Amino acid sequence: MKKYRQMIAVTLVLLFADVAADPLQPAPQTSAADTPVSAAQQPATLTALSPYFFAAARSGEAAVLQEFILAGFPVDLKNEASYTALMIAAYQGQASAVDLLLKAGADACIRDKRGHTALMGAMIKAEWQIARQLYAIDCDQDNSAKATDAITDKSQMTAAQFAEKFGQTEKFKALATQLQDRTAAQASTTAAQPY
């Protein structure tokens, strides 16, 4: 696995670095994160590297994902199946990858071509630890549909409707209760602390 990480890191540096300088002069040593990618290079670079990025999310290789993030790789890039790395990591139960991607600014509210979010992927695979983390990000705040309402537009389906559709209503309600309990505990701890 270490060899895999090293290969990805070297690939990132080579693809993102400016190596077109004078071939007789060694290129100055810079990290991939310090070297901007030109607009012309970007699509080819993304195409070449995206399979590695999504494989790292799928397998939970946080160190490899971190290299991509440091190199400026777009965390919300979708693959050919319309999934983001966050969706893949959540579906595969890769909690550390989910945490890393969220901290890097990944948008948990992006939907795939079926209208599913990362939270929905975690719920369908019964990855409740990850679902708890994603549930705290309210993607349905502007949607007042009830869980039992008919789904007329999958791109507007709420997490509660998804849970109802797949028989996960009780587990989904437990997420809400856990979040409320955690929020109340944090509020009481904060109130009890002296200034």
Image: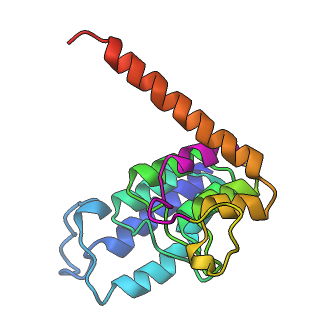
| Residue 58 seen in the figure | no
| Residue 107 seen in the figure | yes
Residue 61 screen position, x and y as percent? 58, 52
Q: Is residue 133 magenta?
A: yes
Quadrant into which the C terminus falls: top left
In the rendered image, which quarter is residue 92 located in? bottom right
Q: Is residue 102 magenta?
A: no
Query: Could you tell me which residue is drawn at 62 percent across and 60 percent down?
Result: 159
Q: Is residue 34 above or below residue 19?
A: above
Query: Could you tell me which residue is drawn at 34 percent across and 20 percent down?
Result: 190
Of all residues, the one furthest to the bottom in this rendering is 40
Residue 118 screen position, x and y as percent? 59, 61
In the rendered image, which quarter is residue 91 located in? bottom right
Query: Could you tell me which residue is drawn at 58 percent across and 67 percent down?
Result: 54
In the rendered image, which quarter is residue 120 located in? bottom right
- Nearer to us in this view, 12 or 78: 78
In the image, is 94 to the left or to the right of 46? right
Residue 49 screen position, x and y as percent? 49, 74
Query: Could you tell me which residue is drawn at 52 percent across and 74 percent down?
Result: 50
Residue 109 screen position, x and y as percent? 49, 64
In the image, is 105 to the left or to the right of 28? right
Q: Is residue 20 above or below residue 58?
A: below
Q: Which residues are magenta?
A: 127-144
- Nearer to us in this view, 4 or 58: 58
Q: How is the image coloured?
A: rainbow
